[in-house]
Amino acid sequence: MSLAEATALTRLAERLRSFPARPGTKIMEVCGTHTVAIRRSGLQHLLPAGVKLVSGPGCPVCVTPDRFIDEAVALARQGVVVTSFGDMLRVPGSRSSLEKERAAGADIRAVYSPLDALKIANESGKETVFLAVGFETTAPAIAATALKALEKKISNFSLLTALRLVPPALQALIAGDTRLSGFLLPGHVSAVIGRQAYDFLLQQRLPGVISGFTAEDIISSLLLLLEMYNKDIYMVMNNYPRVVRDSGNEKSRTVLAEVFEPVDAEWRGLGAIPASGLQLKPTFAALDSRHRFVIRAESASPRKNCRCGDVLRGLIDPPACPLFNKACRPDRPLGPCMVSSEGSCSAWVTYG
């Protein structure tokens, strides 16, 4: 960073610190990557008096319910090769985790992309399942992998889906009366769905700003939000125009629409939300693990005292959970908000 850039950032930070905000202003940073960036940079200490930042449901690992982990464990116990992004391995299900099952001998592999999982299926010849977890950001790559599997006639590959859509979750949060003043909206998701996907905020009289992830991006976005809230201006602003367009990424949305269709879905902490998930269309049923296998997932009652769901709704800060950094720590997580690198609890422990 040049001296001029550092000076400009210092001035921007001072503008935020001295901003005359309304008392009781409550802004939700939806994206887990924003949560980490804010805590890592110490931006929470720049907030003016009367302003509170809360985390939202923008961590895909965190919002995935126990039931999905239980299904993945059940598949692993059937001798299926289970492939997944690395964060999912440590997420506890009702009675076990993929990490524990792998230690017990199950063939569970961390991959960097769904195409890696498809390659494993092609080379091993074994039934291979990819855990399709994520938001609109990762869903297009998963859709493209499904198309590739059909094109290459790789018949031993399937998807166990837990894909989620961000706008319906925000609508559910608003309906749940969390007393929010506005949203710091995710940059990566918005690159796919576009600014227009958040137009529902206008009817709810809530401002939103799509933000990038640098300190300058976040501070300037917070200033825009606070200015709109102070003046009762309700609109969605794109403060990340170098990446996000009004209509999003047409190619990504096209491949999503070809492979997936909306479905009612369960979110940790938010419950069932209409049309908030993606499932494979009937024409892709051959790639659906739930159609291919009989999955008898064990279940148990929810973990006592874990308040990850309340953190995801912005109702509490992580330290308000009685397990936070005590029974539940990054080296021994009990809840997904402590497991994921984008989880709010993990960010609070790591960066303070």
Image (tube, helix red, strand yellow):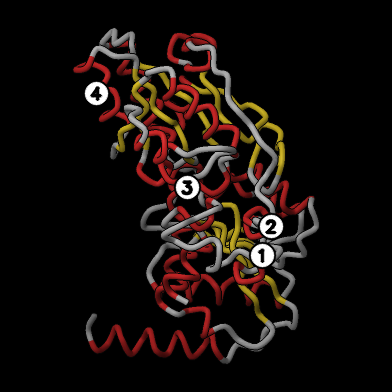
| Alpha-carbon span between mark 4 and mark 1 | 44 Å
Above or below 125: residue 219: below
Answer left or right for 231 relative to 127: right
Mark toward the start of the polypeptide (4 vs 3): 4
Task: Write down the quadrant of residue 145 in the picture.
Answer: top left
Mark toward the start of the polypeptide (3 vs 1): 1
| Alpha-carbon span between mark 2 and mark 3 | 31 Å
| Alpha-carbon span between mark 4 and mark 2 | 39 Å
Mark 4 vs mark 3: give the one in front: 4
CB atoms of marks 4 and 1 within 8 Å? no
Disc 4 crowd, CA 10 A, few/some/many (<14, 14-19, 20+): many
Q: Disc 3 marks which residue?
A: 189
| Alpha-carbon span between mark 4 and mark 3 | 28 Å
**Of helix, strand and loop, which one carries label 2?**
loop
Mark toward the start of the polypeptide (2 vs 3): 3
Above or below 270: residue 258: above
Mark toward the start of the polypeptide (4 vs 1): 4
Disc 3 crowd, CA 10 A, few/some/many (<14, 14-19, 20+): many
Mark toward the start of the polypeptide (2 vs 1): 1
Q: Disc 4 marks which residue?
A: 120
Answer left or right for 258 relative to 147: right
**Of helix, strand and loop, which one carries label 4?**
helix
| Alpha-carbon span between mark 3 and mark 1 | 17 Å
Q: Disc 1 marks which residue?
A: 182
Q: Disc 2 marks which residue?
A: 305
Q: Amino acid at mark 3?
A: Val
Q: Amino acid at mark 1?
A: Gly
Mark 4 vs mark 2: give the one in front: 2
Mark 2 vs mark 1: give the one in front: 2
Answer left or right for 208 relative to 217: right
Q: Amino acid at mark 2?
A: Asn
